[in-house]
Amino acid sequence: MKRTMILVSAFALLLAASDLFAAGSLTVATSPITFGLYDLFSPTDNTAGQGEVAVTYVAGPNPNPPINYTITISVSPNSGSINPRTMKQVPPTADALNYNVYTDANNRALAGLSMGGLEVMDSFMAYPDMFGYINVMSSGWFANNKAMYEAGDKRLGEIAPVLSKTVKYLIFTQGGPEDIAYANGKEMLKVFDKHNIKYEFSEMPGGHSWYVWRYDLMNFAQKAFK
């Protein structure tokens, strides 16, 4: 109910800021409320929130008419898919900026850390001809995930010739043995070695932290697009 109290408190503060709040009464009624569950990595809601918070305010002595306000917790009209949540160009020229950009791999870089490093892996392995500069920081396939290794091994075998032609700089970085992703990352690189994919490896003390990643990004930025 903590979120409910925040909503009601915000409404009460709004009323307090007006002259209507003088010598009034405020009542709150709720139906059974659930806020639902939502997975950020899923395009759909796991469980839709539901319920209502009904607020009634009577200003001063009766017979002043009550002010009613209902907060409804439900599925947003844009829920259910990632696409409707993105900004739309309506009309076609609204909410849009045009840029002149290069679209070739020589002018495209990709970097990510931790779980973001796995996203980087997924991206350049799905589109091996689209990125010329790649930095995977503090990441690696999960060593106990046999299916992940089998799929990765198979895919690297397919794309190794493309990567050798397209990628100018591929680096894997870690925050030393104390990095929680260190063992996973080192084990994964054995598969890259198996397919003779060229890469650089760098590590420094600091663990799984921005202390390390800031250095990695600074180093990568100086190597990209050279």
Image (spheres, rainbow, N blue to C red):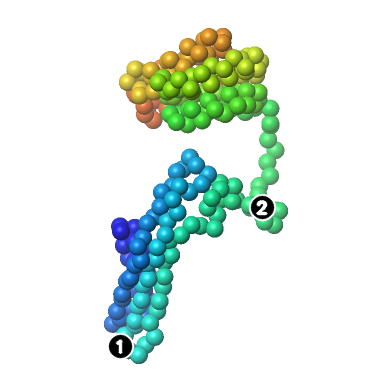
Q: Position of residue 100 (x, y in %)?
A: 70, 38
Q: Secondary structure at mark 1?
A: loop
Q: Quadrant of the N terminus?
A: bottom left
Does residue 202 show up?
A: no
Q: What amino acid does circle 2 point to? A: Gln
**Image position of 131 with respect to 193: above or below:** below
Q: Residue at x 46, y 17 (%)?
A: 188
Check disc 1 and give the amino acid type.
Pro
Q: At x 51% / y 57%, what residue is drawn?
A: 76
Q: Nearer the viewer, residue 221 or 73?
A: 73
Task: Give the spatial CA distance, label 1 vs label 2.
Answer: 51 Å
Residue 22 in the image: above or below residue 170: below
- Describe residue 155's horizontal placement relative to residue 188 as left or right: right
Q: Residues within 10 Å of mark 1 (few under 14, many from 20)?
A: few
Could you say which is closer to the camera, residue 19 or residue 219?
A: 19
Residue corresponding to mark 2: 89
Residue 34 seen in the figure? yes
Residue identifier under label 1: 61
Q: Quadrant of the C terminus?
A: top right
Packing grade of label 2 (10 A; few <14, some 14-19, many >=20) is few
